[in-house]
Amino acid sequence: MRYEKKLIYGVGINDWDTPVRQNGKLIKEYYLWQGMLQRCYSDWFHNRQPSYRDVTCSKEWLSLSTFTKDIRAKKNFDKCLSEGWQLDKDILLKGCKHYSNETTCFVPPAINNVILKSDRARGNLCIGVSAVKGRFQAQLRREDRKNITAYFDTEVKAFLFYKKEKEKQIKRLADLFKDQLDSKVYQALINYQVEITD
């Protein structure tokens, strides 16, 4: 019990009334809360994932009980428990680096993964573009794990190909999950635009 009641990452307050372990496993709410706090406040995590250095969470969500109350009320929390849906902070508001009740939603892993960016892998080139043997390669992985790859003479042409294909992929997934998604999440995905500055 002592472990469960200490501050998490020096800021998170476990004010939960019951143990956060049931049958030897952390409850899902605690697991999500701890993961969010790690992304916001862990130096170790920031060293491994530098793109999270500026990520924050609302003051209210430093409290486990408030966090739990809020996420249990979100559409698809049940799918988080049963189907592995994930808490996302930057679909409703593209580029958002703040976890809060207003900025987060639950989405299936397929949607969360398609939105992920790999800043480290691409270096200084546009999103979706890499340099290969004097040409520019546009590449993205489809949800069926097959790659779409094309080569161009310019970085911009490669990016425009990537943008078109990525936006089609996002819309296809939005339509696939339309009946399950919160309407605000669906609209954000349908309107999602890949920018050259992403």
Image (spheres, grey):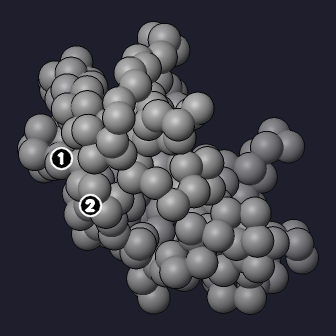
Q: Position of residue 131 (x, y in %)?
A: 53, 41
Q: Secondary structure at mark 2?
A: loop
Query: Would residue 30 be visible to someone looking at this image?
Result: no
Report which quarter residue 101 is drawn in.
Answer: bottom left
Pick the front one: 137 or 18 = 137
| Residue type at the position of mark 2 | Lys
Q: Which mark is residue 88?
A: none
Report which quarter residue 33 is drawn in.
Answer: bottom right
Tell me: residue 81, above or below residue 48.
above
Which quadrant of the figure contains the N terminus? bottom right
Pick the front one: 63 or 160 = 160
Lateral position of residue 124 relative to residue 41, left or right: left
Q: Secondary structure at mark 1?
A: loop
How many angstroms separate mark 2 from mark 1 (CA)?
A: 8 Å
Mark 2–mark 1 CB contact (< 8 Å): yes
Pick the front one: 104 or 136 = 136
Which residue has dot 1 on it? 192
Residue at horizontal 47 percent and vertical 69 percent from the top: 67
Q: Position of residue 146 (x, y in %)?
A: 48, 11
Query: Would residue 153 be visible to someone looking at this image?
Result: yes
Report which quarter residue 16 is drawn in.
Answer: bottom right
- Badge 1 crowding class, 10 Å Cα cut-off, few under 14, some 14 to 19, many 20 or more, is some
Which residue has dot 2 on it? 94
Residue at horizontal 38 percent and vertical 21 percent from the top: 150
Lateral position of residue 44 relative to residue 160, left or right: right
| Residue type at the position of mark 1 | Tyr
Which quadrant of the figure contains the C terminus? bottom left
Q: Position of residue 72 (x, y in %)?
A: 39, 53
